Amino acid sequence: MAEMTVRVNERLVTLNAGTRLREIAARVKPDADLVIYNGHPVDDDRLLADGDTVVLIRRGEQPDPEELEAAMVARHTPGVHARLRRACVGIAGCGGLGSTVALSLARVGVGRLILADFDVVEPSNLNRQQYFVDQIGQYKVEALCATLARANPFVQVESHRLTLTPENIPAVFAPADVIVEAFDRAEMKVMIIETVMSQMPGRPLVVGSGMAGYGRNNAIQTVQEGNLYICGDGVSEARPGRGLMAPRVGIAANHQANQVLEILLGEDLR
């Protein structure tokens, strides 16, 4: 009889052609109350095909590490996780943009993140950055490493507590497939753009520009200029009377994170 290979809870299983979903669920995890088939939860039975991905979850159960990783990425399009876990993304700055980008990329399973920031967590950061009251006074790279480990312990995080300069940026982010700019100050944004464009030609750089205040959701967009991707509305700078707030900063940050995914995965796995 012909055979096929199906990935079940991150393990490759060889099955006879014609095996049905409910049959393998009953065999592997009969107490599962959530069945995710090729990235989507299903309630019905169906024939399995070669290359299918099945994740079986028992709600409230603490799975072993291998099953945990499979369950965490179960809602991905098949093929996405294998490619993301091989990727490396550098994040320059761990404030409102950088901490949010890092958390989003950790949650989707990017295999390696390189964080760089010199600052400490302050009370004024808590209105928009991915930190907590008990982390006040900690260096941001250290606090963010701890948060990312709680969200996804399978991501390798490399942290650099330093001020980024044209002299150290190429070395710090040398392994990165994509670099994310997440600075507050305009002159630092210009500096990293010039550095990456001149010293790391061809390396994709995703920057943020314009996300102060609130409202105008659809004004935030992504514009591409060669290997440079600019996310934001391009005009709304923080100033007296217009501060930085979590919702709009989060929209811009996730534009950046989503753009990173498109660079890493292309358009074929959307």
Image (cartoon, rainbow, N blue to C red):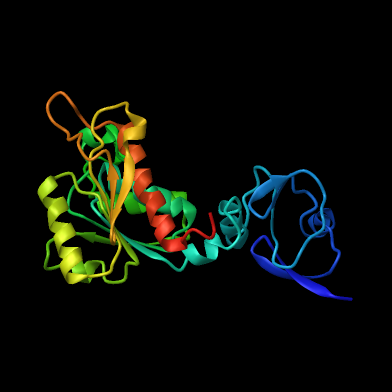
The residue positioned farthest toward the right in the image shown? 1
In front of the other: 235 or 32: 235
Can residue 130 be seen at all in this image of the molecule? no
In front of the other: 234 or 188: 234
Residue 261 x/y as whole percent: 43, 56
Can residue 260 be seen at all in this image of the molecule? yes
Q: Is residue 221 above or below residue 93?
A: above
How many labels, in total? 0
Q: Residue at x 32, y 38 (%)?
A: 220
The residue positioned farthest toward the bottom in the image shown? 1
The residue positioned farthest toward the top in the image shown? 241
Q: Is residue 195 above or below residue 142?
A: below
Answer with left or right where residue 186 lies relative to residue 130.
left
Picture quarter containing residue 88? bottom left
Q: Is residue 153 above or below residue 232?
A: below
Where does the N terminus fall, quadrant-wise? bottom right
Q: Residue at x 65, y 42 (%)?
A: 60
Residue 42 x/y as whole percent: 73, 45
Residue 240 x/y as whole percent: 12, 26
Residue 89 x/y as whole percent: 35, 61
Picture quarter containing residue 15? bottom right
